[in-house]
Amino acid sequence: MNNNLVDDRLREECGVFGVLGHTDSAQLTVLGLHALQHRGQEAVGIVTFDGTKFQSEKRLGLVGDNFTKQPIIEKLSGISAIGHVRYSTRGETILRNVQPLYADLDTGGFTVGHNGNLTNTLLLREKLVSSGAIFQSTSDTEVILHLVAKSKKLKFIDKFIDAIGYLEGAYALVALTNKKLIGARDPLGIRPLVLGKLDKSYILASETCALDIIGAEFIREVENGEIIVITDDGIESHYPFPKQSPRPCIFEYIYFAMPHSVIGGRSVYEIRKQLGYELSKEDNVKAEIVVPVPDSGVPAALGYSEGSKINFDYGLIRNHYVGRTFIEPTQNIRQFGVRLKHSANVQMVKNKSVVLLDDSLVRGTTSVKIVRMLFESGAKEVHLRIASPPIKYSDYYGIDTPEKDSLLAAKHNMDEMRDYIGCTSLKFLSIGGLYRALGYSERNNEMPQFTDHCFTGDYPTKLSDIEQIPDHTSQLSLLEE
Amino acid sequence: MNNNLVDDRLREECGVFGVLGHTDSAQLTVLGLHALQHRGQEAVGIVTFDGTKFQSEKRLGLVGDNFTKQPIIEKLSGISAIGHVRYSTRGETILRNVQPLYADLDTGGFTVGHNGNLTNTLLLREKLVSSGAIFQSTSDTEVILHLVAKSKKLKFIDKFIDAIGYLEGAYALVALTNKKLIGARDPLGIRPLVLGKLDKSYILASETCALDIIGAEFIREVENGEIIVITDDGIESHYPFPKQSPRPCIFEYIYFAMPHSVIGGRSVYEIRKQLGYELSKEDNVKAEIVVPVPDSGVPAALGYSEGSKINFDYGLIRNHYVGRTFIEPTQNIRQFGVRLKHSANVQMVKNKSVVLLDDSLVRGTTSVKIVRMLFESGAKEVHLRIASPPIKYSDYYGIDTPEKDSLLAAKHNMDEMRDYIGCTSLKFLSIGGLYRALGYSERNNEMPQFTDHCFTGDYPTKLSDIEQIPDHTSQLSLLEE
Amino acid sequence: MNNNLVDDRLREECGVFGVLGHTDSAQLTVLGLHALQHRGQEAVGIVTFDGTKFQSEKRLGLVGDNFTKQPIIEKLSGISAIGHVRYSTRGETILRNVQPLYADLDTGGFTVGHNGNLTNTLLLREKLVSSGAIFQSTSDTEVILHLVAKSKKLKFIDKFIDAIGYLEGAYALVALTNKKLIGARDPLGIRPLVLGKLDKSYILASETCALDIIGAEFIREVENGEIIVITDDGIESHYPFPKQSPRPCIFEYIYFAMPHSVIGGRSVYEIRKQLGYELSKEDNVKAEIVVPVPDSGVPAALGYSEGSKINFDYGLIRNHYVGRTFIEPTQNIRQFGVRLKHSANVQMVKNKSVVLLDDSLVRGTTSVKIVRMLFESGAKEVHLRIASPPIKYSDYYGIDTPEKDSLLAAKHNMDEMRDYIGCTSLKFLSIGGLYRALGYSERNNEMPQFTDHCFTGDYPTKLSDIEQIPDHTSQLSLLEE
Amino acid sequence: MNNNLVDDRLREECGVFGVLGHTDSAQLTVLGLHALQHRGQEAVGIVTFDGTKFQSEKRLGLVGDNFTKQPIIEKLSGISAIGHVRYSTRGETILRNVQPLYADLDTGGFTVGHNGNLTNTLLLREKLVSSGAIFQSTSDTEVILHLVAKSKKLKFIDKFIDAIGYLEGAYALVALTNKKLIGARDPLGIRPLVLGKLDKSYILASETCALDIIGAEFIREVENGEIIVITDDGIESHYPFPKQSPRPCIFEYIYFAMPHSVIGGRSVYEIRKQLGYELSKEDNVKAEIVVPVPDSGVPAALGYSEGSKINFDYGLIRNHYVGRTFIEPTQNIRQFGVRLKHSANVQMVKNKSVVLLDDSLVRGTTSVKIVRMLFESGAKEVHLRIASPPIKYSDYYGIDTPEKDSLLAAKHNMDEMRDYIGCTSLKFLSIGGLYRALGYSERNNEMPQFTDHCFTGDYPTKLSDIEQIPDHTSQLSLLEE
């Protein structure tokens, strides 16, 4: 579940999109997934239904590199479609794990895409295999397929609700049958899902930016614990779980979502500026320039500049052509301090005292490099400011966090972190500041407004696999690919 | 099941190979499948077991084009392996249908490769889906996986025998678990399977030519209805079916097997010469030269020449570089009589009366072209002789035959066929001659010595799917790929 | 020479890099070209010399997609290397046109890479072909190879100087022989070239950002009209042309160069801020927010914001996953206003009066879309401001400009442009403001400080091909590829 | 020039084809080259002329694998075309060496394909480079392009004749300009070239089999020393060399040409049967079966069987799926005697005394394996018979022979060869028998009827490069690819 991070970032594991009843369903899905590309860059899949058959195309890589040719769009015929973009570490990104997954049920075809992560996958998988189920992937999403297939209920929607009842953890699902487009969010609404409308067709998507790209109207968010069933006759909602307050993932605001997306009625861009603003109010450093780590640190740096009255400028330039598998320089080259991803804008930082703004701090390896580069470029002081609290706990709900031991803040105090990074001073936004930026006076510790365990250790659900299974590998696939 | 034939040939659908306990198991399997390549040119798969994990590689195309690189051999680590070559029409050749298929059972990993065709696939599939099974391919072999997974027996081998008991039709299986290499033939032994030994390792293969290529010793054929279980401790056989006489497929002798293979103790090459010899004895045509359709008609032509005392010569030359997807000439080029696959050896046939020998006649389209080419090259007479009886019935046991309506002999009498082909005269080997060539005085109509329904309509097993299912498509996959 | 622009941008045609005497020469060249990727994204080539043989690798696509694997780096062995990135329209991007070009001369191997464009290519090519030269590309750089090969001089460097003497137009060259790394700039220094040093090895590169990425020290610019010859013994300079003032291309400051590059002693980033600042001083619009067209309009927008005291904010979000061949939406989707490259940050622009900042205006097609998107997002007013003067003339020195008729400012007055684009008001930076931003009180019309004909029509060299050749195609290659 | 042989065969280096004035010129060329595929399997090239531009497509690999798709045929538009198939060892097979080669001359485009090998390439190349020519390939054919380009003659055909005059060695050329299709054979006619006609269009091809495949009529052979110029107005011939007797390469009959081709009025198939027949008359071995090494030894074996009255049978079976880069078995597998290319037909050879017929003997490595395989299969005696004389000398005219030291017969006497191969007895056809099979009473030693230096050491032309150049590498390309 946890993987090494190539570039010291948290990564969202997925984005989903679905549309029913539009003659350009495949093309709309391609565009929607393109807008959600930041949620998963490793693989893309689209399944359409043409009235008789389902068509599926899955590819490793980006939407724009794989779904641009006319033949692939023509192959994906039909007026309903769902799609999925996926992030995963290399070892596991094989085509049979790429979603949407598909099954022929006795009620007809059924396909599903999943954003999030279940916390009782292994227990469910073990039971299913014992009863004769054959798994074809290591994706935890396949558990959902088998639970639906095994359900003794007669109607499809009852099978689906029956299956969902077994799941623990986080999920935002889009699913498609020969008649229905279905959306579902877990009881706490940890992962996002929104409902939109284009012309007369309903759309489901992880973020509003996927509605914007196709000019669709935003209707509302799918609610926590809601199962929304869209057919030609309209929308019908099921609420199979006990009612409770939503608790969405706070990282959507801090890092994952596109800045122009709107979540929970809040502009992500404005929240990020506000995070920087709150941070400036908790700070009193003297400096001459506020420099963002581009691009993700830019809004917070603008907010910090506004709050601190220190000038904002681009002291770091991002190389837009960095691919994900760039050449690994040899040791004798690396010593010269190779700068592949970011370059210092030397003329702007030379002889200056710099406030360096980043959105979050994971392992700190990138910060080490950037701070060193700024000093080598002549900066007098580098004050690293992080527009969120220290990350001390791993995630199990669909964010790819490193092992707890690799989280810099999990094992080190502030002084150790500052020394490791090599900056003049280091400061994080407080939990209080975080909640203030989001519009609350404080965190409700009884019933927290957000899923924020990475900062607090306060996990919102049971973690059955972690707690109960001594040897997790016993039911993983023995087929290596 | 029946498909258009690209080049007017019957096609075997598969070849299988397995080895247990050899340090070069992957490489032996590559070589063995290369020797069995004539049994399937569309796709290849190999699964190995390395003591902990199973490795699988599946590719569309030829063994020699796909399994020659060191990295792929190194990836297929382990000391046991099974492999499969497959023929299938294009529409269905997708990687998820390529064998061996694999499942994680609660007893561990299990993988199987299948030569043959079941005749109750659809009935079994319908039942399995109703009970919650999710099929990932349209291959009838997947039914076997699910039957094993669902079996309530506790020991693996009991699950396997339990599953086999549900099957109707033809099968020669090789299967592999973490301890066992298993071979199985259907109760009539329709498809071939032999046991060999190399050093201390046992080998299973469709034909003896796959033992020859690696220098392995031929031990014996796996018997009809036998399940042979090979472990480090040796060989153990199970006979779960009532004892009966074998009834192997007669087309292995006529066309499918390699000429140097030995089946049922008979040299295939010698049988083919004998088919030509018997045909010459039923014939009395006057001619100056016996010309084979190369390469498959050569042994029969040599036998015919020996029997008739008419000189054998290569009047047709085969182009060895013909691929399977050659350029389709435009109409205005085609009119010149393009000769892609065979060329006339004009100097040999000009002004001669020719006996043209072929092994079998399916739709007759190739014969039309060859006969016309011989006449255009100056042949005075072309007497077409077929070294087997007329094919009047479709196969359902793993031979890819066209729809019955496309079989030339199913709908036309001898005169019509001769006129269609345009030859001077046309003659087939009789059923009596066929059995004489195989060493019998006559066909035992009560208990035929061979599976020969393509000539006789006498099918050896029930054809449940054909007889009982009105709409076959209901349980096929709705996922088009 | 002029081509349709896919995305309404001017494009630099090339970047060059060279290194002599470093054990990691290939890897340094890969990194340097990666830093110069913005100067050409269509193709990359690297040639190295290993003491005996030259190695060459040329690929269509990006550096990071093509030169990341160890085998390709190992193949490019040697301690000297030159490399080239290239932009070109599709029809002409074939591998044989990709630079560096190579020739076996009787003095040994010779390879050259060229940034810029000659204005007498066709005349030279015609003469060379008449004397028996065989051209293998349509690249004007091949003319240089043939001129060197044909030179009657005995020493290589004399041949090179002899050849350069025939050229008109713009060129920054890097060349490599078995002993020498050579750099050369045209008499006016239109295209940039800098000299750096890493450890004991000299480096040549189009921009300082290519020195920064490898941690090399910037020494100086290669001067206009200078031929710099680097050997193991050090540096030697030749000045074969009459001395004159330099006249570098002004577009390097406005758009082409990386913001952190330093050209002519000036920080490109600061110049761009200054362009915005000067523009704000020529302006008096009332507005609530300054929004850049990201990323190229950002520095100018920051400068404009500083000068005008109007708040800077990201009202447009750039999609970082836009590839160069994205899906072309069908008409019925396009009507919804698809936003592939930029999205509006609706919450920031709604109900606001917006100053929209862009660096330059070419055909105006992108501006039309962005302005419309801002209005659709609720902007009250959109005041488009361009931080450079109107482009009225085509370039012939290595910038890919559209046909003059396609330049919006060449055929329309200010009101027509504003109406076409649909903005509330439109304003360009004046020529005076442009030169003030660059640190001059005014343009020296007698002897202009920069190559600025795109704004002024004042071409710095003869345009022999344009003026003298009636039918340009007669000496282009008749071989279409 | 000489290369290691992968599989112990002599290899023809090329085949050529050309057509003028046919609307399907590209497709005819594809078919013609497919029929000539046996003359070169490493690379294919086709150049067409559409009235304005030349189109070129070059690919490594087989015709049928590379020129089957409609887009490539459509791209090769035009009504005239030439094509080339090439054999070359791996190191040198790079696309820029693949023919036809092309040049823009001042008289227009010119493209040429060459079968054969020049013996003064290096001398000519040295002179051309000194005068400023830039070579883009290491192909000796490029010398011809430069000689034509440098010619001071005014008319194209005079330039061509001028250029041809400098050449020594063997060549059969097809060339194309915007008006002319040209064929040329060296003064001795060493390599073959025939003229055909299809409808109203003339065809040039290496062998008649390329006429047969498209249904074209054979007109005549191009004569030795003839330059044939085909235009819309018809055919015109030039004879620039002193008249002499032809001296065609004898290996076309023995091994290279397709059996159904006709060369010098003789059926290749019948000549090969006759070679076996003559050999049988020089032999008196007692044996029970004549076995050919398939496929090339088959006609000789039929002739030997006819002459000796010993039965012909297939004692060896060829695997038709052998690719050119098959898996190299590890040593521990190789010891079992892996049989990739040929298999013994054990039932036919067991306990028999075998006459094994092959067409020629080069290094003997394959013979060693086959003889051992026959003995391992139970053969009592194996009498190897070679239907041509011992090869003692290397070729320099376009046949890929190994270094002289690797030719078994160059260094060993009959007893040594027999012992090395391990056969019971060994016998070659005599020079006298060879000429008798070809219809002559004896070899004319004053003026030999054929180019036969591989057997006799009697080279038909000067070998200038071999004799005069001490260091051949000085003018080879320094650019490694």
Image: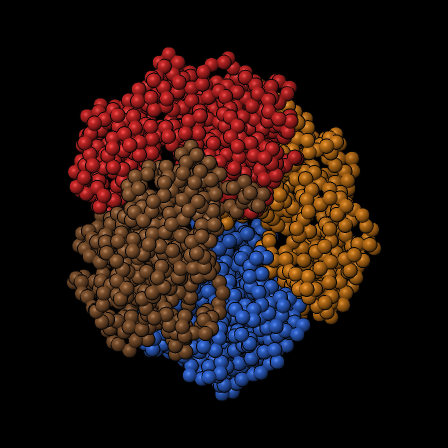
Chain colours: A blue, B brown, C orange, D red
Residue A263 appears in view: no
Residue shown at 63%/57% (left/top)?
C328
Task: Quadrant for the N terminus of chain A, please.
Answer: bottom left
Q: Which of B381 and A379 is in front in this view?
A: B381
In the image: residue A71, left or right of residue D51: left
Image quadrant in which you'd find residue A478: bottom left
Residue farthest to the bottom, as pictured: A242
Q: Which of B251 and B414 is in front in this view?
A: B414
A161 is higher (above) or lower (below) than D308: below
Residue shown at 52%/65% (left/top)?
A55
A174 is higher (above) or lower (below) than A301: below
Residue C269 appears in view: yes
Image quadrant in which you'd find residue B190: bottom left
| Residue C140 position in % (x across, y down) | 62, 34
Image quadrant in which you'd find residue C208: top right
| Residue B208 position in % (x across, y down) | 25, 52
In the image: residue C282, left or right of residue B435: right
